[in-house]
Image: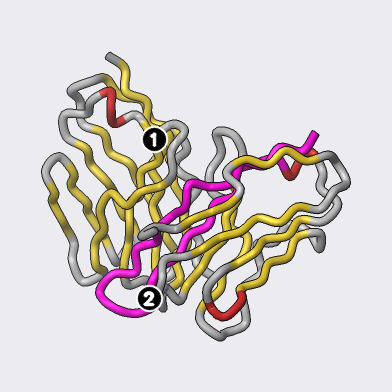
C-alpha cells in the first residue's frame, strides 16, 4: 500500500520561509493534501493539489509537486508564530487517503 | 450538525474494561477512517471503511480492537480489555470517495485515558 513520509520537526524564525517536505510511494495518487493541526485542535485542510499540476499558490502557501520523484512540498512565506502547528501531508488514491506522521513546525520570534 | 461528530469527547476508564467510541460522519460521505494520535505523535491509521466494501483493518494494533459501520453511516470503535498504552486521542474522519475533491473531514476526537 501507499507509504507517506515526512520529516518530524522543523524550526524557523518569524518572517522566514518554511518548507515542509513529503514523499509518497504510489504514483497513482490523484490528490495530495496538506492538513494543519493546531495545538489542542483537530486536523483541518490547508490546501491540496491535483496530480496533474506541479504548483499551486494560495496567498502565503505554495505547494510544489514533483510527480516523477513523488515529492510534495509546502512552502509558507513570511512564517508567523501563529503558523506553529503540526502539518500532515496525505496522498489519495481511489478515494482512500494515507497520511504522513506529521511535521511539527516551531516558529521562533 | 454539518461536521463529523464523535462521542464521548473524553473517556476515562479502568484498565481491563471495554470501551465504545462513536463516530457520526458527514451525511453522504462513503469513506470513514479511524486514527489514533498519542500525545505529540502523528496519526496512526487504524481502520478504513468504504461504502459496502470489506473494511481495511490493517492498522488495528491487536485483536482487542474492532470497529463496525452500520448502514454505511455511524461507526463504533470498540476496545476490549483496555490497557494503559491504549490511552490516546481517537480521531474519526469521513470523505467522499469520488469527485473532484476527496478531502477528509475530521472530528474533534475522543480522548481516552486508561487508568
Determine which residue is flagged by label 2: A28
Q: Is residue A37 left or right of residue B55?
A: left
Residue at 68% x, 67% y is: B67
Q: Can you give x and y, in whole percent of width and height, for residue B27 in the image? A: 41, 71
Q: Can you give x and y, in whole percent of width and height, for residue B18 in the image? A: 81, 53
Q: Can you give x and y, in whole percent of width and height, for residue A69 in the image? A: 33, 61
In this picture the colour scheme is: secondary structure
Query: Relative to the observer, which residue lies in front, B22 or A83?
Result: B22
Span highlighted in magenta in the image:
B87-115
Query: Relative to the observer, which residue lies in front, B3 or A65?
Result: B3
Quadrant position of residue A80: top left
Q: CA distance from mark 2 to mark 1?
A: 30 Å
Determine which residue is flagged by label 1: A38
Q: Can you give x and y, in whole percent of width and height, for residue B95 in the image? A: 40, 68
Quadrant position of residue B71: bottom right
Q: Is residue B37 something one can see in this rendering?
A: no
Amino acid at each position: 500500500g501507499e507509504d507517506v513520509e515526512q520529516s518530524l520537526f522543523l524550526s524557523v524564525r518569524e518572517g522566514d520561509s518554511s518548507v515542509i517536505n513529503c514523499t509518497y510511494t504510489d504514483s497513482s495518487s490523484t490528490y495530495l493534501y496538506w492538513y494543519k493541526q493546531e495545538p489542542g485542535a483537530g486536523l483541518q485542510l490547508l490546501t491540496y493539489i491535483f496530480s496533474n499540476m506541479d504548483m499551486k499558490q494560495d496567498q502565503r502557501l505554495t505547494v510544489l509537486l514533483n510527480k516523477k520523484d513523488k515529492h510534495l512540498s509546502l512552502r509558507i512565506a513570511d512564517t508567523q508564530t501563529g503558523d506553529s502547528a503540526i502539518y500532515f501531508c496525505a496522498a489519495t488514491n481511489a478515494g482512500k487517503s494515507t497520511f504522513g506522521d506529521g511535521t511539527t513546525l516551531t516558529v521562533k520570534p | 450538525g454539518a461536521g463529523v461528530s464523535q462521542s464521548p469527547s473524553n473517556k476515562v476508564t479502568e484498565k481491563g474494561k471495554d470501551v465504545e467510541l462513536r463516530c457520526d460522519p458527514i451525511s453522504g460521505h462513503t469513506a470513514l477512517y479511524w486514527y489514533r494520535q498519542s500525545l505529540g505523535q502523528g496519526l496512526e491509521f487504524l481502520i478504513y471503511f468504504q461504502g459496502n466494501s470489506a473494511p481495511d483493518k490493517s492498522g488495528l494494533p491487536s485483536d482487542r480492537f474492532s470497529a463496525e459501520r452500520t448502514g454505511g453511516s455511524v461507526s463504533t470503535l470498540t476496545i476490549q480489555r483496555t490497557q494503559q498504552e491504549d490511552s490516546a486521542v481517537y480521531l474519526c474522519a469521513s470523505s467522499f470517495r469520488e469527485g473532484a475533491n476527496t478531502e477528509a473531514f475530521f472530528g474533534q476526537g475522543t480522548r481516552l485515558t486508561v487508568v
